[in-house]
Amino acid sequence: MKIEDSVAVVTGGNRGIGEAFVRALLAAGAARVWVGSRDPDAAAHLAAEEPGRAVPLRLDVTRPEQIAAAAARCGDASILVNNAGAFLNQRLIGADSLDAAREEMEVNYFGPVGMARAFAPILASNGGGAIVNVLSSGGLVAVPAMGGYSPSKFAGRAATTCIRAELAGQGTQVTALIVGSVDTRMAAHVAGRKERPEDIAAAGLNAIKRGVDEVDTDYMAIEVRASLARDPKALERGMARMLSAATISTGR
């Protein structure tokens, strides 16, 4: 698929990986990028830099009425980047309640599924287009220290496969991005090397152009997949040790 002259919707587009996607899409020649954010004012800096091309869009992916409003407004979309995510850093058993796990599932699983459902007819009417789901290496291997986040990304990866099958007939390509540790606010508690958001976005655009189903975007994601193939039980034990670690680190 070509990026040039396309119209994209990016959820959580006001900062981090989402902002990097917005900038990368515009640099690649996208005609317009709808910058989804719970607070449109948070995307004002992008709109000021690219008037008429970066357009703030009020969008909380946990609110069906806002998803419906976004779909009604963005009828020109040919690319959907499901980037919005939540990590609340609570355990499944140790947390006082399941509220955090429920919110992570709402944002990280039901959000992308709801967006895909709303935008599938729009993408079909615009030639098929593409959906990119920004996932995590925590969706390849369970990370107990990440509480409900890791299970939500497992669910998101499975949903990506299901959506790909459902939308194949209308010519919509559906890509899963497996992302490691990235230098964003979400990973502020993680020590060690972190990837640049713009490098993740570049990998995502390359996947769109090539029509790739799933891609590991960075060193950590590649290492996790390789470790899972070599010795899955050893990797599971290593993930479990993180529960008692004083500092969570990428190890690099």
Image: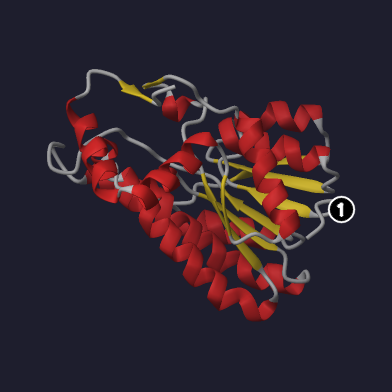
| Residue depicted at 76% across the width and 43% down the height | 25
Relative to residue 191, is residue 25 drawn left or right? right
| Colouring of the image | secondary structure
At x 35%, y 52%, the residue is: 152
Front one among 93 and 209: 209
Residue 67: quarter of image: bottom right
Q: Amino acid at mark 1?
A: Asp
Looking at the image, which residue is at 74% across and 45% down? 33
- Visible in this render: residue 70? yes
Q: Position of residue 133 (x, y in %)?
A: 55, 53
Return the residue nearer the eye: 52 or 241.
Answer: 241
Q: Residue furthest front?
A: 230
Above or below residue 188? Residue 150 is below
What quarter of the picture does the N terminus occupy? bottom right
Answer above or below: position of 30 versus 13: below
Question: Residue 78's x, y, as percent?
Answer: 74, 61
State left or right for residue 147 relative to residue 3.
left
Position of residue 221 measured from the top left corner of the image (x, y, whole percent): 48, 41
Label 1 secondary element:
loop
Res 141 visible: no
Quarter of the image for residue 53 reads top right
Give the percent coordinates (x, y) of residue 88.
Answer: 32, 35
Judging depth in this view, the residue of 31 and 157 nearest the camera is 157
Residue 166, placed above or below residue 156: below
Q: What residue did someone put label 1 on?
A: 5
For disc 1, the neighbor class at 10 Å (few under 14, some 14 to 19, many from 20) is some
